[in-house]
Amino acid sequence: MAKQAVLLIGDLAHASDEWSALSSKYTLKEFRKGEREQFLSNCKSGEYDDVVALYRSNQSTSETGPFDQELISALPKSLKYICHNGAGYDNIDVASCNERQIGVSSTPVAVDEATADVAVFLMLGALRHAHVPLTALRAGQWRGESQLGHDPKGKTLGILGMGGIGRAFAHRAQAFGLNIIYHNRSQLSSDLEPSYTIYVKTLDELLERSDILSLNLSLNAKTKYIISAAQLKKLKMGSIIVNTARGALINEADLVSALESGHIGSVGLDVFEEEPKIHAGLVKSDKAFLLPHVGTMTWETQRDMELLVLKNLESGVQTGQLLTRVPEQKSFNWVKDGDSALASKI
Ligand SMILES: NC(=O)c1ccc[n+]([C@@H]2O[C@H](COP(=O)([O-])OP(=O)(O)OC[C@H]3O[C@@H](n4cnc5c(N)ncnc54)[C@H](O)[C@@H]3O)[C@@H](O)[C@H]2O)c1
């Protein structure tokens, strides 16, 4: 019997050997580099007509463009699984995948620790206005215009979105003596909810009580601009915002106005509304501690993410189950539930 085919889109940096080893079981096809038009044309020509599962990533969006309705409708009829490398998958039109009954997995869990580490780094950087001494030192001005910062101890940290990264951040934040409150779509079950956190029922209450607000929820049509001028006003004067989730959760222009007025004391941001473009008001602000979306950029985490995508791909092809299927697909009757016990150990 002919081997089933799997397709790699974009590059692998850490799991090339594991990918190559799959050739004993599957026909390996690759679209490592190219343009969207070329990829669409390959789909139409029948080149991928035997492909059952594909590997893609946030990075490979630069080769194919987003997996939007146009691209998903061009994918071969044989395709059953899109195994995505990235915890965020806002560049995949999941609704179109649902229509075609294509399963989609992402890489939660593997990203939690590294991204939470960056959230801590950003929180401390924002509390200390670290941008000023860092740039002064390299300009030969020693401390330059550095001013006193703030301690985290005794402040209230409000976490919006208490998933894997939110919980990993809470775990770290506890060590700094912060009081931790959170708001989530629903309160976490007792086995998931850390004992040192308090659930608040509304976003408004979270905003009103927080000294530091951390965004840890996913971006979708409902959460875009969840923090805009009206929500920023509800935060205390001088409060701090940390965002490691997605830039478009915050209206960046409103954020810049709030920073300029002093209502927001400082920000620590890893993500931006129109990456790689950054609002000029943020770039020039001494109150903004900024990183260029490096949340998961460690050797260990990048390798774990690549391996998890390959595990999803194999699990899909072998058993019909994805280990870390995106939550939007969990209620469909064509979905076979993954082995959640296994997924939680990854
Ligand atoms: N900076 C980076 O490099 C980086 C790395 C990994 C992930 N991320 C981003 O972080 C986000 C969170 O990742 P995660 O793995 O913790 O996701 P997750 O799915 O485990 O958690 C998200 C949480 O947000 C909650 N939520 C969703 N909508 C909400 C709403 N309207 N109000 C309140 N809560 C809501 C969900 O209930 C869930 O508990 C991802 O979606 C991704 O975009 C960024």
Image: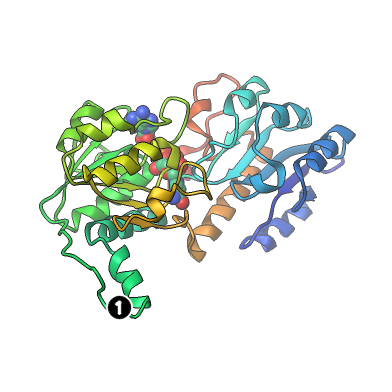
Residue 271 visible within the image: no
Picture coordinates of residue 332, whole percent (x, y): 54, 20
Along the line of sight, the residue nearer the viewer: 158 or 49: 158
Image quarter in which the N terminus is found: top right
Q: Is residue 168 left or right of residue 238?
A: right
Along the line of sight, the residue nearer the viewer: 142 or 321: 142
Give the amino acid type for the residue marked by disc 1 in the picture.
Gln
Farthest left residue?
154
Residue found at x 28% / y 41%: 258
Q: Is residue 165 left or right of residue 190?
A: right
- What's the colour scheme? rainbow
Picture coordinates of residue 191, whole percent (x, y): 27, 38
Picture coordinates of residue 304, whole percent (x, y): 52, 57
Q: Quadrant of residue 150?
A: bottom left
The residue at which mark 1 appears reads as 141
Pointer 1 residue Cβ closer than 8 Å to ligand 1: no
Q: Is residue 244 above or below residue 294?
A: above
Callout 1 secondary element: loop
Q: Is residue 333 above or below residue 343?
A: above
Residue found at x 73% / y 26%: 73
Question: Where ligand 1 lies, by quadrant?
Answer: top left
Picture coordinates of residue 131, whole percent (x, y): 32, 63
Q: Quadrant of residue 13?
A: bottom right
Task: Answer few, some or many: residues within 10 Å of disc 1's Cα (few below 14, many 20 plus, some between 14 and 19).
Answer: few
Residue 87 visible within the image: yes
